[in-house]
Image: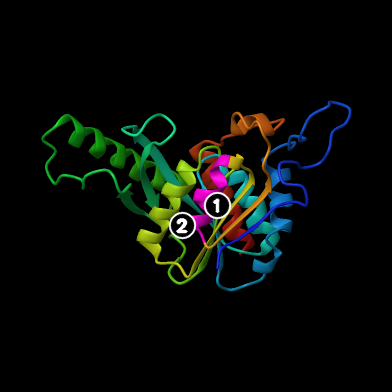
Amino acid sequence: MTTFRLDDEPGRTRQDARAGLRAERFLDAREAGRELASELEAYAGRADSVVLAIASGGVPVGSEVAARLGAPLDVVLMRRLFTPRGPDEPVCAFSVGGTLLLDEEIPPRAASPSSGTDFFVAEALDELARRERECRGVRPPIELARKTLILVDNGVRTGSTMLAAIRAVRAVSKPARIVAAAPVASPESVEAVVAAAEEFVCLALPQPFGHVGVWYANFERPDDARIRETLERAAGRG
């Protein structure tokens, strides 16, 4: 059964009367991750829980969630390729646990590229493989099969990235359960994400939404070197 948990007042986080804002911004991704973790306490200390952060923006949020739940942390790497459905609905390539795959609307990768599209897709997947090596180093992927996967991003605007990531994770890992989680989301994205995941946990649904970065006083997207450092710290905690 799909559940969806929000603060007591959908569309609002903490009131900021001084600024007259509808919802107060998070200071940074780490503060957002700590608050998000408090809504995910049911998964704390469980041997079957794994936090998967969507790189790169979801990594600092997911790192805090994993630390507070006592769960392992891994990443899902993504690259937007082209937009046959429009700019708000990108088609993506993913690396999940070292496995490269394409979103469902991209033809399978050609063994020998012969067209411009083939070469474009091949280059994108090669770049993802390079990033996977840079981010992971010698650390092996975490086993994801039959686990409860908490898929974390820093925000959900249209839902397209989260939905594509859910499809990719299901295709690769065959998890027992996927919990989509983000500190902030647009109201328009909720229905699709709720339908795709077993659970969607979010702290605020501000309206109007704008860009995810609007809801952070300090908005960060770590590079691959910092992602690697984050994964190494998480492995050390484990």
Q: Which residues are magenta?
A: 188-197
Callout 1–callout 2 Cβ contact below 8 Å = yes
Q: The disc labelled 2 sits on which kind of residue?
A: Arg
Q: Which residue is mark 2?
A: 139
Q: Which residue is mark 1?
A: 231
Asked if residue 219 is positioned above or below residue 32 in the image, the reply reads above
* Nearest the eye: 41 or 236: 41
Q: Quadrant of residue 138?
A: bottom left
Number of residues whose C-alpha sits closer than 10 Å to that of mark 1, classed few (under 14), some (14–19) or many (20 or more)? many
As measured in the structure, the alpha-carbon distance from the residue carrying label 1 to the one carrying label 2 is 9 Å
Mark 1 vs 2, N-terminal side: 2
Looking at this rendering, what residue extends furthest in the top direction? 19
Residue 238 seen: yes
Q: Position of residue 71 (x, y in %)?
A: 61, 64
Asked which secondary structure carries label 1, the reply is helix
Q: Position of residue 109 (x, y in %)?
A: 20, 45
Residue shown at the point (13%, 32%) measured from the top left:
115
User: Taking 80 as reference, is 114 left or right?
Assistant: left
User: Taking 8 as reference, is 73 left or right?
Assistant: left
Q: Quadrant of residue 99?
A: bottom left
